[in-house]
Image: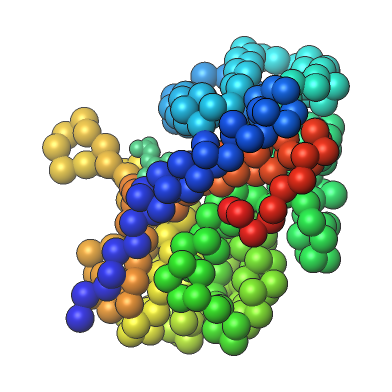
Amino acid sequence: MTADIIDGKAFAANLRAKVAAMVPAFREKAGRAPGLAVVLVGEDPASQVYVRNKHKTTVEAGMESFEHRLPADTTQDALTALVEQLNADPAVDGILVQLPLPKQIDESAVLATIDPDKDVDGFHVVNVGRLSTGMHGYVPCTPLGCVMLLKDRLGDLSGKDAVVIGRSNIVGKPMAQLLLAENCTVTVAHSRTAHLPEVVRRADIVVAAVGRPEMVKADWIKPGATVIDVGINRVPGAEPGKTKLVGDVDFAEAVEVAGAITPVPGGVGPMTIAVLLRNTLVAAHRLADVPYDEKAI
Ligand SMILES: Nc1nc(=O)c2c([nH]1)NC[C@@H]1CN(c3ccc(C(=O)N[C@@H](CCC(=O)O)C(=O)O)cc3)C=[N+]21
């Protein structure tokens, strides 16, 4: 049996449309548009593509987009000063500092400077703490997008066995917290996990976020399981000089065993940006004291 393909691209387009539909009422009440500031340090080509996409989708949703591009040799102090300026700017509801940052910059120090109430990435320790204690804060966009896809597919996730492969601060750990909050039994596996294929084979839900191209094979997957592939790996393509994107799951194999699976591209990636807009909309409501119905999106 072949798996259903989870169309993250379509789901994300729908989510963006829902966000956009809520912007006019916010503008009416607050007298301004929701605003998202994106800070990019350096010239990494992949990061430039993401930042351009974020700008485009933000504007399409009727929000204000503030782009700040700084040179690769930017100092810690200069970046901190910009973040503080954005913290103080009433037109800015959400701040995203594109990661990774150049070597000379202490990433966690920069994230700690962002006002937690404008931290739409959910990377500030205050929001990490809020998530792990069940308080309202901001949840990282990629894992929140994964949970939306899972709930859309499976409904109630209570009692499901979930295995998250990867323990990063931006995906693996918050993913585990979110699944726990959905009453899953959660295992966090990683590069040192013993008998990884066996561990993954127990799971009703597999979330692969390790950053290794096509690592998860068909015989690691329980037949009928739901597979969410967070990996975005650029590898050599069929023709010389060309590249292609693949996930952390060997899609061609896994699609024959799984019940449902996200493709790469067109799966989790587009969800990340849609959730960023959703988080910015929520931040705008909270900062402007306009009531927001958490059940809306
Ligand atoms: N502070 C911060 N927050 C982030 O959320 C953040 C970041 N830094 N640094 C980089 C990663 C990566 N990321 C992606 C967003 C969208 C796609 C996406 O839309 N991908 C498309 C394909 C895009 C392509 O073709 O290259 C897809 O999977 O279909 C991918 C990756 C957000 N990130």
Seen in the picture, residue 176 relative to 102 is either above or below; the reply is below
Residue at image point 58% right, 40% down: 22
Q: Nearer the viewer, residue 227 or 12?
A: 12
- How far across and down, in percent of the image, does residue 65 sit? 59, 22
Image quarter hosting the N terminus = bottom left
Q: Is residue 121 visible?
A: no
Q: Is residue 266 left or right of residue 193?
A: left
Seen in the picture, residue 232 relative to 60 is either above or below; the reply is below
Determine the image quadrant of residue 32: top right
Number of numbered discs visible in the structure rendering: 0
Point out the residue furthest to the left here: 239
Q: Is residue 92 left or right of residue 278?
A: right
- How far across and down, in percent of the image, does residue 71 sit? 62, 12
Residue at image point 16% right, 34% down: 240
Seen in the picture, residue 190 relative to 184 is either above or below; the reply is above
Q: Is residue 220 left or right of residue 203?
A: left
Determine the image quadrant of residue 129: bottom right
Q: Is residue 205 left or right of residue 225?
A: right
Q: Is residue 293 visible?
A: yes
- How far across and down, in percent of the image, does residue 132 sit? 78, 64
Image coloring type: rainbow
Residue at image point 34% right, 82% down: 224
- How far across and down, in percent of the image, does residue 8 sit? 39, 53
Residue at image point 65% right, 66% down: 178
